[in-house]
Image: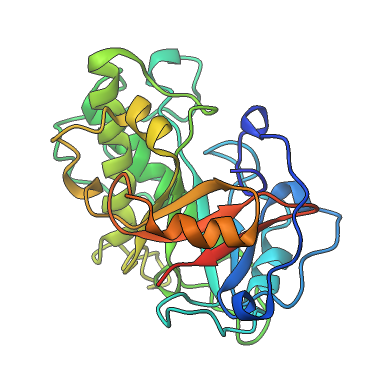
Amino acid sequence: MAVVMLAAAALPALAKSGPPSKTQAATTGNDISWPQCGKSYPSGQAFGLVGVNGGLANDQNPCFASELAWAWSSTGKSLPAVQPKASLVVNTADPGQVTPTVADWPVNNTDPNGTPVADPNGTCTGADDAACAWQYGWNRAIQDMLWLLETPTPAGVSALPAAYPWWLDVETGNTWETGSLGIVKNVADLQGMVAAFTNTSERTPSGALLGGVITVGVYSTSSQWGQITGNGASLGSLGGLPDWIPGARSASSAQANCSLTGFTGHVTITQWFGRPYDGDYACP
């Protein structure tokens, strides 16, 4: 993506685009993340999407608190009605091929919350395999939710993971494994993230639910998604997830892109490149 994309090397050149028309205004929002730190935020958006991470899958956006509050200031007039005022976006990656240089690559099936996890791919021992890739994805999602729970929020702004849709930013600008075996591990990694976000059993010591997310979607393009996951029949829990598709250069083009075929499921949001921040269209 252009603004909320968390790998700077993958940022495309932004194109100038005019504001949405009055008929589009009720269905358009904006996405912001760490590149907007220290800058003014959009205003008048129907909905807002905020990046949790600050450039990598394992770091935090230093402006997350203020940007989350900004998203909750959205008008909430987006259509369809299922598009909420605020959504969260997380960076994704599978750095298994560069271990042992990855300090947080898992060596067991215990996550950042200190909870033992049942890994469907077997026991993680620190190897570059599907079991540890799945655990890495689970760990990243748990850490993202812990960051949300630890973020000071003003009155009326929820810090509960289940209060938001969570979008997985899946792009080739981040670190992924290659080859047929690498693709299997990439898929396991993303499946681990989905499993963590949707689990309803893990809680923090204070009793807060780490999971319970109703909607997990994917931000990507068909080509990038295919390169990372192979787009094959073994996607499991990734199949059917809603899609958020970039690439348009104007609000009207983004609206037209709602008719595109999704790479995992129904196209729910489309994005257009703009200055000084991108726009997003809520598809019917």
Q: Is residue 130 above or below residue 156?
A: above
Q: Position of residue 147 (x, y in %)?
A: 55, 57
Q: Relative to the observer, which residue lies in front, 257 or 241?
A: 257
| Spot occupied by residue 214 in the image (x, y as percentages of width and height) | 31, 69
| Residue depicted at 28% across the width and 47% down the height | 264
Whole-percent x and y of residue 140?
43, 43
Q: Residue at x 86, y 54 (%)?
A: 38
Left or right: 156 in relation to 230: right
Camera sees residue 209: yes
Q: Residue at x 34, y 65 (%)?
A: 215
When the figure is inspected, residue 165 is found, relative to residue 219, above or below; the finding is: below
Q: Position of residue 83 (x, y in %)?
A: 46, 74
- Taking depth in this image into account, of 270 and 207 the one nearest to the observer is 270
Q: Is residue 140 left or right of residue 173?
A: left
Quadrant including the N terminus: top right
- The reply, left or right, for residue 32 in relation to residue 42 is left
State the residue in front, 52 or 19: 19
Indicate left or right for 197 with 158 as reference. left
271 shown above or below 161: above
